[in-house]
Image: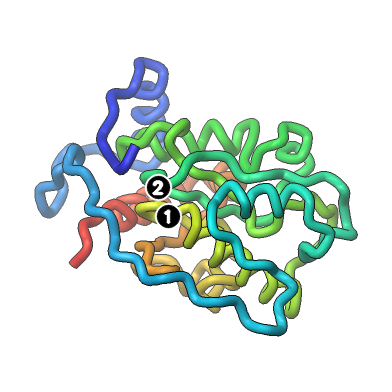
Amino acid sequence: MGGEAKDIGLAEAKSALAWWLDAGVDTAIAEAPRDWLKPAAPPARSPAPAPPEATQQPAHETLDQFRLWLEHSDALPVGGASPRRVLPRGNLQAPVMLLAEMPSAEDAAAGQPLSGDCWQLAVAMLAAIGISGDDAYCASLSCFHAPGAKLRGADLEACAEIAREHIRLAQPQRLLLLGDAPCLALLGKNLIDARGHAHKVEVVRTVATFHPRHLIHRTLDKARAWEDLLLLMEDEA
């Protein structure tokens, strides 16, 4: 993949058009020209630092090792809350990594971090910026479906440490945080304060936006989410 532009099919094109209309896009003209077909330059990466001594998380050399650990480890945060694990999907060096909150019951049943209407909306959002849903890397801050659980304190810090290693190993070209919990974990800010700015997480360009679940119920925020997507795809300064 490596950020190369790919043709999208008719269904994806219709999905992208529907997203643009919902987001209030009524012109093809932006303030500055944008080369959507220009491959993104891979960011320079520093060696992964060793994990702190206090953590129970072992070091991993590859993404496959890390995902195997997620699948079988008994030491994950909120692991006792539910035996249902929802593992990440996607490939190394994806054009964009989506990091959502804890999976819902629907996500757990489908076995993917985003599912159903939420995934269909995410696919439309990605198609609107020229990325196929099949090319995105999708993960959750915690891989467990835990009804009623909230990530706070030590659990949130542990999930943040795991997410940072996940990002280092997955090596996405861009990172999109979906909802409050990923923002709090990785940026130390809630979504309202994190939106509208480009951040860096493990040297990866990062933007925060609404979870698709929120956008399904608050459609007026789709226009604001479109602004976040444009910010995500801007070239590095």
Q: Which quadrant of the rendered structure holds the C terminus?
A: bottom left
Residue nearer the viewer, 9 or 227? 9
Instruction: Sort mark 2 into few (<14), some (14-19) or many (20+) by Cα contacts within 10 Å.
Output: many
Residue position marked by numbered label 1 in the rendering: 171
Measured along the vertical axis of the image, is residue 52 above or below residue 77? below
Residue at x 63%, y 65% (from the top left corner): 162
| Residue at figure coordinates x 56%, y 51% from the top left | 211
Residue 134 or residue 234, whichever sits in front: 134
Rendering colour mode: rainbow
Please tell me whether mark 1 sits on a helix, a strand or a loop.
loop
Q: Residue furthest bottom?
A: 53
Task: Answer yes or no: is residue 213 visible.
Answer: yes
- As shown in the figure, which amino acid type bears the numbered disc 2? Gln
Q: Which residue is mark 2?
A: 93
Q: Residue 213, how many percent across, how many down?
A: 61, 45
Q: Are marks 2 and 1 in contact (CB under 8 Å)?
A: yes
**Of helix, strand and loop, which one carries label 2?**
loop
Instruction: Tell me the tag on residue 17.
Output: none
Residue lying at the far left of the rendered structure? 33
Q: Position of residue 114 (x, y in %)?
A: 62, 40
The residue lying at 63 percent from left, 82 percent from top is 52
Quarter that holds the N terminus: top left
Q: Residue furthest top?
A: 10
The residue carrying pointer 1 sits among few (fewer than 14), some (14 to 19) or many (20 or more) residues within 10 Å by Cα, namely many
Left or right? Give the position of 81 relative to 150.
right
